[in-house]
Image (cartoon, rainbow, N blue to C red):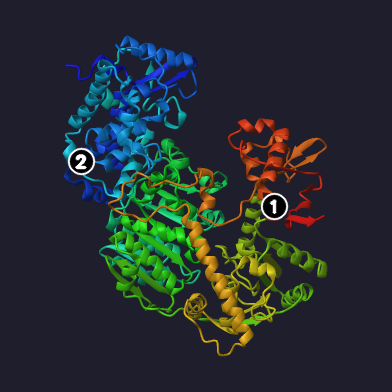
Amino acid sequence: MNEFSRQELALWGKKGDKDGEYFWLPLIAHLMDAKNVIGFLYMHWLDDGQRKLIEKNLGPKAANIVQFLGYVHDIGKATPAFQTKQSRWNNPDLDHEIVEHLLKAGFKEINDKLPMAEKSPHNFAGEAILLNYGVEPSFAALLGGHHGTPCSGNRNLKRDIIDHTANYYQRDHDGDIQQMWKKIQQDFFEFGLKECDLTVSEIPAIEQEVAVELEGLLIMADWLASSEYFDEDKNKPMFTLIPLTDEDFVFDRKQLKQRFQRAIKTWFVDGSWIPQRIANIDNYFENIWNFSPRNVQKTMLSKIQSSIDPGIVVIEAPMGIGKTEIALAAAQQIAAVKGKSGVFVGLPTQATSNAMFSRVRDWLDRIGQLQGNSFSINLAHSKAGFNLDFSKLPQAENLDFEEDETSVSVNRWFVGKKSVLSKFNVGTVDNLLQMGLKQRHLFLKHLGFSDKVVIIDEVHSYDAYMSSYLKKVLSWLGAYDVPVILLSTTLPYETREGLVSEYLSGKYSISVKKIASTLDFTKKTEYPLLTFSDGEKIEQVADFKQSTQKKIEVVRLNLDETNLAKDILAKVENGGVAGVVVNTVARAQQLAELIKSLDQDMPVLILHSAFLAPDRAKIEKNLQKLIGKSQEDRPEKLIVIGTQVLEQSLDIDFDVLFTDIAPMDLILQRIGRLHRHKRVRPSGLEKARVFISGIQGFGEYGDANESIYSKYILMKTDYYLPDELIIPADISKLVNLTYSSEIFDQSDLSSDSIEKLEMAKKDEELFIEKEKQKAKNFQIAKPKSKKLIRGWLDLKKPVNDLVGDASVRDIEDSIEVILVKKVNDEFMLLDGENIENVDSAKIASETIRLPRRLTFDIEATISELEKETRSLFADWKTDPWLKKSLVLCLDKHNSTHFNGYKVIYKPELGLVCEKE
């Protein structure tokens, strides 16, 4: 007995043409494909924690409901509005053949154009059809959102069938034709219920956080079920279309099951991580890293091991203590307890992400070897393709673990928006913060992070704007019961309490204020410090074996540039490595040139963001070699001048340190590079000393410094910074004093200084409030179980996917360009290679971000650069590496005139801009 009529089997779900031949896929085939795929993903791709969350809401028939969701997701295609829809690439011949195919199957007058078909897109039509059948609205809303954006909260889909009847039934009034379409839709709907052993009454109201998860799972399943080939490889078929000449499609469950099994076998090539509890911390460290754990590492991990219901963990410890190893080991332990199947590590910058990627890859590689398994890992930032460690990993589908040297690979299906679905991810924290940003396909972000243990490094570096997103994201991670590990050199206790409270408020659906009032938080300033939640209980551990304390002498300088340069030279006159950290690129360049003019024999290295990406990587590698942990290549004399990049994840060691005034935590971060390793110091530099410049008086730090950092925080840093530091003992105390909202003793300040301080405080409070309000413009709401996902992503102004990164950071727009130079009518890279002889990937890596002063009129600048790029390199528009690139062309001397500046690239200084 055929379960579908000829007309029902003739409905198309997909169509296309290849080399003049027409192809299609019957709607019922796609519905069954999606049902089978989502069922597989639910049982074998979701982790125990995700299934537990869903089953708690959906009950014992959760798997049936999920399969029905996959099946019914495109029921809106069983409408004349969709069946008469033009093909995506506007192929009228294909569209004509499809209509002829429908006419042959018995549809009448289906070739008549519907004047308002676009008013009922199939995803919203599907939602309307389910509402018409009395399906729970929170479930029906999942159909409306399966293309990435749910129906607006202002739209009444219950009226859509009434207002646009012909879109659903072909005619507004013709009873016979209407009845035919109604029967088709009813047949598809009832078949799906029967196929999934379900009744309408068994579909419950879907809680919001579960609905977001299910929507993400549906989008993933739909994309998979719509993939004809794995990675566009015709030798790896998945859910292929069939020739339109095969008009008489026969519904065959067995064939559809075989089609599904073949596709999943092609796609599901990664091993599953089954995390093991750590039985012995010492053995774990020896097996993974070939060294024994420090006391602080062992103590923290043993405490985390004792958690029955781990939630959020905050690890505050100095640089070099091994926070990364603690976090990765804790991630494995917690994943085993919570049933998680992946790990995400988020960092502030691409540079720090690259450094961390290698460490996580090695950890994962070792775990894979010990388990006899292979795992995929993804590097998640816009420059990932240029990372050698990432690009050299084998593709997962080509991996034979027994023969390959590594157990870590890359699965090419997880690219673009799907990259977050990869089980192991390292990347910029923007990827995580975008969980809080209203944008299309946000559901995938939530699905992708809900199966992981989330590690966030350098939490102390996030400003008020980013912190607003972080708090919102933590509340959602709490709602999903996703374990979170926060790493920081140190945090103000108010920040620590705020982050923990946001997480627990999401987990237990309680207001932050109520959570904060019930937490047994003390204003701990002990250091190092471990804070972690075990269920609703908070524990803090500060009882660690005392590490060696280091005394640092702090000297304030108020010198002009020439005398500062002379002072730096004097400090290394008898040998030594001086580190000089300044707050702007221009100041770094000017100081380097000044020092060279005073002593041309003095070796000077400079590092900042205004270098070509390959040049910066070489400089960083050279610095690590020269002044890293090893003594072997350490020079007798060297001055290293850099901006904030020197304080980020570089294991370098200075004999003496100079730094511009900066917030307390950043100064302490910079001091972490002073006398970092045990070694004999040069004469006169045996004692660790840091020289602070830019302090002209209390509250007077120069326009440049005050434009970068909060004047109020600089004033508090200036006030609390002692003449002698004890590191690490003083770190937490000083950071808390600087960032505490409590009023501090001002008795030793003049009335003028107090007035300056109060004005700066008021400006700071206004700025922070403005940042918070600005961040809220594009933020989703906190999780609310009883809310529908309809209207969840509604915006007053649309935000496209391209501004997603910028929207979680409050930064000015900037322009990235590829630098080339023209020599004798030939175009070359700046290293002299003719671009005709260089592959596109290398050309695309020669990028630099233009300083703001060159792009004050950013739209006009982009237009000018686009025009020049099209003129010089017209063929780039079809090159996958270069099609979105902009070029700034220099002359043979590496210079040009641009927007009122002379711009010159100097390998030793970077991009120099001189006002004309």
Residue 916 shown left or right of residue 834 in the figure: right
- Residue at horizontal 56%, vertical 65%? 651
Residue 559 shown left or right of residue 363 in the figure: right
Q: Residues within 10 Å of mark 2 (few under 14, many from 20)?
A: some
Asked which quadrant contains residue 291, the reply is: bottom left
Asked which quadrant contains residue 593, the reply is: bottom right
Q: Is residue 334 above or below residue 881?
A: below
Given the current orientation, which residue lies at the most extreme bottom position?
A: 747
State the residue position of label 2: 203
- Residue at horizontal 66%, vertical 59%? 608
- Residue at horizontal 31%, vertical 64%? 280
- What residue type is disc 2 on? Ile
Whole-percent x, y for residue 66 in the image: 25, 39
Whole-percent x, y for residue 9 in the image: 28, 18
Whole-percent x, y for residue 204 in the image: 21, 44
- What residue type is disc 1 on? Phe
Q: Secondary structure at mark 2?
A: loop
Q: Secondary structure at mark 1?
A: loop
* Tag of residue 856: 1
